[in-house]
Structure formats: structure tokens, C-alpha cells
Image: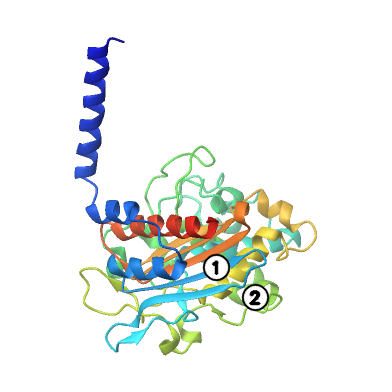
């Protein structure tokens, strides 16, 4: 390549970079390029300056003492500071608990990963495409092709309350792909999985999770719904453009960051499992998760290279998911601080 062509290519690359930055909110760029603070607490305080109403972080790293950190508001209206051990809505982090429960039921021979939607719900043949081919295994792995019921227009403005109402949102819709041939994150999979567990157990599967997971790990601050807790112990949640605190909207499981961290450690080191169960789990699901419902973003991840569990809760969401991207930047900065 001639020197002139090299210069032209470099100018083109620079122009492309500048154009891409034009479309990236400058807040994200700022959060990314700011000097790294010395402590995780300083990073939380900085994050509040970026627009989050509140944050909770729990860190369990090797032989170091666990860190319980918070910044911002537990309740903005009443000016109550954020509490490190407040309850928080877990959203899709709950899928990790579901996958562990399925693993245990499969190990006990009560469920089969190779049985299909048609086996578990004969009434859904002809209602859900490929019901005869969609196995429990591909539902757990988000490879079923079933449409996602939470993608229905304005779903979060008026969320469904029952299994039947949720399922009605995807009835008659064609499959997005053939089972096992692609991946697409889909809450309908876990809607069906939870119903399968309820039907097999004869009672609410969260009770099974309590008996098989929470009680053995001494997790006393993990709950199935808002109905089981004192609402004042729940961190308030806010959605940009929405005037009200979203704390009273029930979206499933709640827990403290510490409880999630202890569970995640047990999931990754295998102590949550009985003999033979870890092999089943490893074949069907992952060991980390994030979650989103209006007002609440949650992240739970284990970092093997520094033997650290990080749980991060953010109490502010927005329609364009800028806050989600901002959260991921902050999480990465926290990990860099832990590695220093």
C-alpha cells in the first residue's frame, strides 16, 4: 500500500470512529474514559453522578472480607439513603434458580430433558408451533424458537398476571426458527418451564427452590414475590420518563445482593449440587446472569481469574437501554478496581 493510500485509509477510519461516537451518548463515553477510582465505593458514588438513583454492590473475593456497598437512594421521595442489604427485584437472574431446580428434578427422574412441550402440555399441540419437537432442554437453553411474550407491544405498561394471560400473547404466532437451530432469549421458555415444575410437584416450585437450594445455603433473604416481604425493605425503582416509584409492581423473586452472591458462589463451586447434578446443569445452562424489569437492573457474575463474585443492582432504567450499557461499563470498571 502506498503512503498516500495509507493516509486515506487512516482518514477514513478516523471519520468512521467520529461518526460512530456521534451516535453514542456522551455519558457512556465519559463513564468509560474517566480515571479509574481507587475503591469500589468511589466507583458507586461516581455512578450516582451519572444519573442512577441508587446502587447496591456485593463483592466476595477469595480470602478477603466481603464488601457490602451502596450509594444513592433507597427511597428518593423520602430521602432514605441506599441500604447494602435491601431487597431488590432479581428479574431474569431467577432463571439460574429455575435451572438448578430443573437439574435436581431431572436428577431425581421426575422430569426429562428430552420430553417435549407436547408431552408436558398436550393441549398446546397446534397452539405452539413445533410443540412435538421443542424439548425441555432447548427451552432451558433459549433455543426453542417460541416467540417471547414480553415482546408484546406495551407489555411492561400492563404486564400479565397469570400463565394463561401470558401464553395468550403468543398464541397463533409462528415460530421464529426451528427448535435447536438458533438462539433467542425468550421469557416464554421459562413461563412454560415454571408451569412444568409446578405441575410435576403439585405445588409452587419456589417452595421446592426453598427446600433444595435456599435453606441448605442459609439464604434467608430470598423471596418468591412481593407478597412475602415487608415492602419497606425493598429498594425503590425508577424508570426515566415515568413519575412513580415502581417498587410495588410484582415481578417475581427478590433477594439481597449478599444472598445472590452466596448462591452464585455455590453454583460456580458446585456446592449447591448433589452427586451427578453438576454434570447435568453444565450441559444445559450458564453460571452467570443479568436481569431487567422497569426500575431494576441486576447483574450476577463470577470472575474465575480473581476468584470473585460480583453482584450489582441498579435502581434506574430507561426506554432506550442507555442505562443498561452504562451499568455494564461500571461493572467492568469495578472489576478493574478489584484486579488492581
Give the number of callouts: 2
In depth, the one of 149 and 127 nearer the eye is 149
Numbered disc 1: secondary structure: strand
Instruction: Give the left or right position of residue 323, taking residue 226 as reference.
Output: left
- In this view, the residue farthest toward the top is 2
Q: Quadrant of residue 272?
A: bottom right
Disc sitting over residue 59 in the figure: 1
In the depicted view, which residue is nearer to us: 90 or 202?
Answer: 90
Give how far across and how far down residue 138 sits, in percent. 57, 48
Left or right of residue 182: residue 259: right
Distance from Cα at disc 2 to Cα at disc 1? 19 Å
Relative to residue 142, is residue 9 depicted above or below?
Answer: above
Residue at far right of view: 275
Whether residue 317 is visible, yes or no, is: yes
Q: Earlier in the sequence, mark 2 or mark 1?
A: 1
Residue at the image point whose x is 40% and y is 56% from the top = 328
Rate crowding at label 2 as few (under 14), some (14 to 19) or many (20 or more) other CA atoms within 10 Å. many
Residue 294 visible here: no
Residue 6 percent location from the top left of the image? 27, 17
Q: Label 2: state its secondary structure.
A: helix
* Relative vertical location of residue 20 with respect to residue 155 in this rendering, above or below: above
Are the residues flagged by discs 2 and 1 in contact, CB closer than 8 Å?
A: no
Amino acid at each position: 500500500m502506498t503512503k498516500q493510500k495509507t493516509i486515506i485509509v487512516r482518514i477514513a477510519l478516523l471519520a468512521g470512529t467520529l461518526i460512530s461516537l456521534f451516535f453514542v451518548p456522551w455519558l457512556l463515553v465519559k463513564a468509560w474514559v474517566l480515571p479509574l477510582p481507587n475503591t469500589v465505593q468511589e466507583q458507586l458514588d461516581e455512578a450516582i453522578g451519572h444519573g442512577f438513583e441508587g446502587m447496591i454492590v456485593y463483592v466476595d473475593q477469595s480470602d478477603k472480607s466481603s464488601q457490602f456497598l451502596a450509594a444513592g437512594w433507597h427511597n428518593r421521595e423520602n430521602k432514605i439513603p441506599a441500604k447494602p442489604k435491601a431487597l431488590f427485584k432479581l428479574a431474569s437472574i431467577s432463571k439460574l434458580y429455575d435451572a438448578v431446580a430443573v437439574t435436581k428434578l431431572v436428577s431425581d427422574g421426575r422430569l426429562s430433558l428430552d420430553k417435549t412441550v407436547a408431552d408436558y402440555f398436550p393441549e398446546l399441540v397446534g397452539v405452539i408451533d413445533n410443540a412435538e419437537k421443542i424439548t425441555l432442554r432447548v427451552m432451558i437453553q433459549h433455543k426453542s424458537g417460541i416467540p417471547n411474550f414480553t415482546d408484546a407491544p406495551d407489555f411492561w405498561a400492563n404486564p400479565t398476571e397469570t400463565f394463561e394471560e401470558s401464553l395468550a400473547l403468543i398464541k397463533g404466532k409462528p415460530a421464529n426458527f426451528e427448535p435447536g437451530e438458533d438462539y433467542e432469549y425468550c421469557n416464554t421458555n421459562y413461563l412454560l418451564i415454571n408451569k412444568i415444575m409446578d405441575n410435576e410437584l403439585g405445588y409452587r416450585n419456589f417452595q421446592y427452590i426453598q427446600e433444595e437450594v435456599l435453606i441448605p445455603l442459609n439464604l434467608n433473604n430470598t423471596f418468591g414475590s412481593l407478597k412475602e416481604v415487608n415492602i419497606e425493605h425493598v429498594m425503590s425503582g425508577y424508570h426515566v420518563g415515568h413519575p412513580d416509584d415502581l417498587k410495588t409492581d410484582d415481578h417475581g423473586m427478590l433477594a439481597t445482593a449478599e444472598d445472590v452472591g452466596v448462591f452464585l458462589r455455590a453454583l460456580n463451586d458446585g456446592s449447591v449440587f448433589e452427586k451427578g447434578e453438576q454434570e447435568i446443569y453444565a450441559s444445559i445452562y450458564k453460571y452467570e446472569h443479568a436481569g431487567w424489569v422497569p426500575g431494576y437492573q441486576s447483574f450476577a457474575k463470577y470472575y474465575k481469574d480473581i476468584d470473585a463474585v460480583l453482584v450489582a443492582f441498579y435502581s434506574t432504567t430507561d426506554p432506550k437501554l442507555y442505562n443498561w450499557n452504562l451499568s455494564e461499563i461500571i461493572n467492568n470498571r469495578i472489576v478493574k478496581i478489584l484486579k488492581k
